[in-house]
Amino acid sequence: MRKQNGQIVRIGDRWHVRYWEKRNVGGKLERKRVTHSLGLVTTRGKRPPADIKAEAERHMAKVNGGAIPAERILTVGDFVERVYLPWVDEFKRPSTAKGYRDIWQDHLKPWAASAWLKDVKTYHVQGWLDQIGESTLSRNTLKHIKSVLSAIFKLAKQQGYFEGENPVWDTMVNPTAAAPAETYAYSLEEINAILSFLPEPASTAFAVAAFTGLRQGEIQGLRWEDYGDGELAVSHAVWNGKIGEPKTGKSKAAVPVIRQLAERLEFHRLRAGDPAEGPMFPNQTGKPLCLGNAVKRVILPALRESGVEWHGWHACRRGLATNLKQLGVDDVVIQRILRHSSVSVTQACYIKARDVAVVDAMARLETKLTESLMRDEALLSGEAAITIQ
């Protein structure tokens, strides 16, 4: 492409520079007339001031440099759907890929799709996040949306579709957005109550969740050949019927099986015909049972008349962490049992303070204060007696 000087024009209250550029439109290279914003109009004259001319020269130097090949000049929408989402499908877990795709379709696409990727600045991204933040989404969801957007530009830079600093870095989500709802952890009393109401095999599946802390997909992925020597080896996870790897590398580990769970598993195996291999919790066709369907068809109906509330499978995982903590188990040990990559995740998201524990702690403080006051009074009384003598 020959060198261009560009044409500075005023549109409304902003100065722009116009020039020609080859761009990838729907997979075809097309020569397009481009208008790039340079800044606000701050003078009364009809001619652009020196700072606007300098900005136009800087921008045209980048254009003439041709750092990004024409075939890689895409809109954000084209890049996400033709490059980023296929990359996510290839390298991320299916559940993660679905989550990213949903965030793009439901939240980012309406605002970002038509923008030219290479021209996106921090103020553009902040504008998108501000618009999304006007909804009723929680702060954590908004942070997740921002994280996905940052990952999009990170890959774009790695693949040569974008230059410069990631424009998401210095943005912020709505600070007044609602805080995330508090998550739940089952107590031992609730676990025993639920186990007493559930029929098999849902009862044994729930016991595995409550006494090992395995994730829902990991329970669905359990095979009889994974169970032996008092341990469950976590080596597979099932999501939407697809068998894959556990969530992280550290998730691949053996989890001890306590006696009460071992007894349940042995009865469960006998009821199933004493299999030596295959899914531990199969459906009628012999494939891994979908625990989500089990909740709708078996668990919720069984608990409806019991007065016990269902808080989901992950409440078992949080419950195990919390119950172990109450028994005095060290946080690092709890992290290893739950197979988290970091103990900070265990502490921040999984160990919950029980109301009973909080009340007990304050009661102990009350007792300590009373003892301290009694000692102080006794000392003062002793000093007074000495003075009188």
Image (spheres, helix red, strand yellow):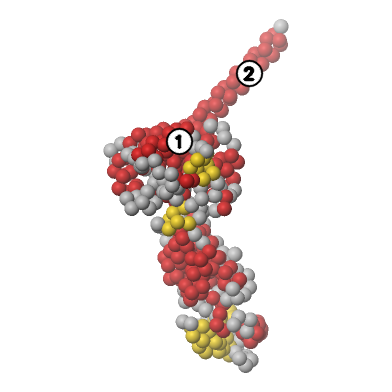
**Vertical comparison of 360 with 46: above or below:** above
Q: Residue furthest bottom?
A: 2
Give the residue type at disc 2: Arg
Q: Residue at x 51, y 58 (%)?
A: 143
Location of residue 202 (image quadrant): top left
Q: Residue at x 61, y 22 (%)?
A: 372
Q: Residue at x 42, y 36 (%)?
A: 266
Q: Which mark is residue 375?
A: 2
Q: Position of residue 186 (x, y in %)?
A: 43, 39
Quadrant where the N terminus is found in the figure:
bottom right
Residue 387 makes an appearance in the image: yes
Q: Residue furthest top?
A: 389
Q: Residues within 10 Å of mark 1 (few under 14, many from 20)?
A: some
Report the number of discs. Answer: 2
Q: Position of residue 250 (x, y in %)?
A: 57, 50
Front residue of this view, candidates 55 and 144: 144
Viewer-nearest of discs 2 and 1: 1
Which SS class for mark 1? Answer: helix
Q: Which mark is residue 97?
A: none
Front residue of this view, candidates 278 and 310: 278
Which SS class for mark 2? Answer: helix
Q: Position of residue 157 (x, y in %)?
A: 60, 72
Residue to which mark 1 is pinned: 262
Residue 203 makes an appearance in the image: no
